[in-house]
Every structure is written in C-alpha cells, then in structure tokens.
Image: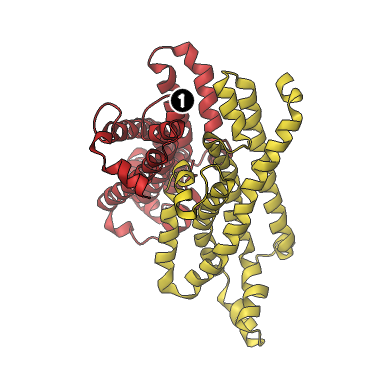
Amino acid sequence: MSLIWAWLADPANWTGSDGILVRTVEHLGYAGLTLLLSALIGIPLGLWIGHTGRGRLVVVNLVNGMRSVPTLGLLFVAVLVLGPRLGGDLAFLAPAIIVLVILAIPPILAGAYAGVDSVDPAARDAARGMGMRPFDVLIRVEVPCALPLIFSGLRSAALQVIATATLAASVSLGGLGRFLIDGQAYRDYGQMAGGALLVAVLAVLVDLVFAAVQRAAVSPGLVPTTSRRSIRKRLVPDPA
Amino acid sequence: MTWFLGHLPQLGSLLLTHAVLAVIPLLVGLAVALPLGWLAQRYRWLRAPLVAGTGLLYTIPSLALFVLMPLVLGTGILDPINVVIALSVYTVALLVRTVADGLAAVPDEVVQAATAMGVGPARRFFTVELPLAVPVIAAGLRVAAVSNVSVVSVAALLGIAQLGSLFTDGFARDFVDPILVGIVACMVLALTLDVVILSLSRVLTPWTRRGRTA
C-alpha cells in the first residue's frame, strides 16, 4: 500500500511527457474518440432498427456474440495485420481505435434499439395522430423517450472502452495502461498498482459524469420508468 | 492450421487452465450472490445499496483489478488466485441484481400457496422460490460465464498462463496463427459454457418446457 502512495505522492510522476497527467489525457483521448465514432455509427443504426423493427435478431446476436470475443486477442490481431499496412504513427493507433470501436458499438446499438423499441406505443400513436411525419415521430417523441436507455448503452460502452483502453499500452500506445505495463517490466509494483488505481478511479468518475449528464438531459417525466431497470440489466458491459 | 495441429497438447493444457480460471469464479460468485440477492429481495431497503454497491465493482477495469488484488489478499502478483477472486467479484456484481430480480419475479400467489400448505421459510426458499427463479439466474450466469472467458485472457499480460498466453506469445513473435487459434478456442469455450448452463437450466425447470407459462 505504501508503495502506491509513494508513487502517487512523487510530483515527478505527475508531470512530463510520460507523467500521470499526460497519460490520463491520452487515455481520455482514446476513449473519447472511440465513443464519438461508435456513437455516430451505433445510435443512428439502433434508432433505425428500433423505429422500423428490422434486424432485431441481428442486434441480439451481435451483442451476445461480441461478448465472447477476447478483446486482447482481437487487439493483437488488428495491430499485427493492419499495422504494417498503415505504417508511421497510425500503425498502432488506428488498429487500437478500430478494435475499441468494434467493442463499443454493440452496447450503444443495443441501447438505442431497446430505447426506441420500449417507447409506449400509445405515445407513438398519439404523435402520429397529431399529424407528425415518421421522421418527426422519431426525433421529437421516440428519441426523447429512449434517452434513458441510449444513455445506459453509452455508459456501458464508456466503461468497456476505458477498461480496454488500458490494454492499448500493451501494443506500445500511451494511456494509463502504460504504468501497468512499464511497472511490470521494471518490477515496480508501486507504479503498477498506482496506475491500476488511477484507471479504476477514472472509470468511476467518467460513469458519474455520464450519470450527471443523463440526469440533466432526460425528461423528468421519464425518470422512474420500470423498464429501464430491467433493460439495464441486459446491457451491463464486459469488464474487458 | 499447421501451427494448430503441431501444438495440440499445449493448447489442451492452456484450454483446461482457462476453463478452470473461468468456471471457479462462476461457482464462487453464485454462492455469494444467492444470499446477497435474497437479502436485497427480502429487505427492500437493502436493495439499492447492495445492487449499486456491487454494481460499482463492475466499473473497475479487469487488468486494474488483477493488479490491485495482491494488495487486498497479500498474494503474489503472479498468483492465479488473484484472477479467480477478481472474476468472482465481477460475477457477484452481475448476479446480485439478477438473483434479486429473479426472486422478485416469483408470483406472490405461489409463495402464499406454499406458506398456506405449511412450508416453512427455508424450505419454501429452496423448493419453491429458488427453482422458479432459475431461468432468470441462469440468464445472468450465462452472461457472466461468457464475459469471464474473455476477461481471463487479459491476465496473460501479467504472465498468468492460459489461452491468453497465445495472444501475448503470438504478438511478441509477430505471428498471427496462435492468436487466431486462441481467439477461436476462447469463443468455443464461451459457447460451451453457455450451452452447459442453458441445458442445466432446462433440466432444472422441466415445467417451462410443457408449453405453459411457469
């Protein structure tokens, strides 16, 4: 325990190009870029599937199937296969981001789909009865009603991405995982455990930020839904 | 394919270790989650703290948890016990909510009928409530099993030998074949556990197969 505090308390470990601050920013950078890309793909696709009801089976099987793929293996294959073709700085970064995006899409997609799918049919009918066109029904009724589950999917994905971004260090990228990998290489347990503690704290903090944003964004009328709880259970992330 | 055929014995032993590291936490996790889930269901005020508290454990990334375990347990960093306990923690985190939900879904009439027939609380739990909650609990267990198999492989980064070692070895030697074999082996193992749990759940709940709603 004292090893961790010694490592965390040393100001030299916080600053510089391989300090804790830079590594945290890198970690958040990988996670942020990944979440942005996967949300851009997963949310519209999930909304479309939920709105039209097409391809439900694909969603269920995709989410369950991806869970069984070992992340670490996928990451290594992507780097070995794609890396040499890309070259330069991108050789490690692009495959890692691609793998992270592949992991993050299923929970986001499932959240968006389940959200739209669980909208009260009466609300949808009422919107249609008021003369809304299908697109308006989607944007002005279904999406706001689906927000709790969309957030649930995003939060699952965020946790998974922050956890998996730790593995990026094993393919010579940065991020907080560096401390775990380097600490092990130098047999410096303080650095390893300190890095692990920072990743855990970061994951909890990011989840809290999402919870706060969710609270601000979701209509108060939707908060005590019963369906949300039952579906969140299905969307729990893998601790990759 | 040649690599696969040439390394079958090694693959077999890695697969076995991997299976053991993934399955023991399932059993431990279930054993811990059953009483906790029962408490969460029996005493409503305990539900929020129990479910949220164990859920919080789930946010800790696996590699971080593997590394931090020696601090809590006093074990060595290479000890496979770290992996077993860490995965048990995840399994508990996942199952407490599932067990509570499964028990909550048992129809009140059934519980009351059992009570009226003079079945005591303990016997009622094991012969009525728990069996009826089996399908829900099994669903949670399947998720935990499949994700455990994937997470175990991460421990290879710390040097704990199992199928994940094929990933680290292959990567270190710039050789894709063992990594692909490892991925397929992991997925086959996950699928096998999934099917086993599903079959067990079917066997334990014969009434669900009669075309009646249980």
Quadrant position of residue A19: top left
Residue at the image position 27 percent from the left and 51 percent from the top: A212
Q: Tell me the element at label 1.
A: helix
- Left or right of A70 in this view: B67: left
Q: Nearer the viewer, residue A30 or B135?
A: A30
Chain B tint in image: yellow
Amino acid on which the number 1 mark rests in the picture: Val
Neighbor class of circle 1 (other Cα within 10 Å; few <14, some 14-19, many 20+) is many
Q: Nearer the viewer, residue B50 or B134?
A: B50
Quadrant position of residue B177: top right
Would residue A128 be visible to someone looking at this image? no
Q: Nearer the viewer, residue B29 or A135?
A: B29
Is B111 placed above or below A51 here?
below
Question: Where is residue A5 shown, x and y percent of the image?
Answer: 31, 47
The residue identified by callout 1 is A171
Residue at the image position 44 percent from the left and 47 percent from the top: B68
- Label the red chain with its letter: A
Residue at the image position 58 percent from the left and 46 percent from the top: B80
Q: Nearer the viewer, residue A30 or A178?
A: A178
Q: Which of the colour schemes (rainbow, by chain, secondary structure, one colour) is used?
A: by chain
Question: Where is residue B174 shown, x and y percent of the image?
Answer: 56, 18
Question: Where is residue A185 shown, x and y percent of the image?
Answer: 45, 30
- Left or right of A227 in this view: A224: left
- Left or right of B25 in this view: A155: left
Would residue B41 be visible to someone looking at this image? yes
Chain containing the residue with disc 1: A
- How many labels sit on residues? 1
- Left or right of B39 in this view: A140: left
Question: Where is residue A182 shown, x and y percent of the image?
Answer: 41, 31
Quadrant position of residue B188: top right
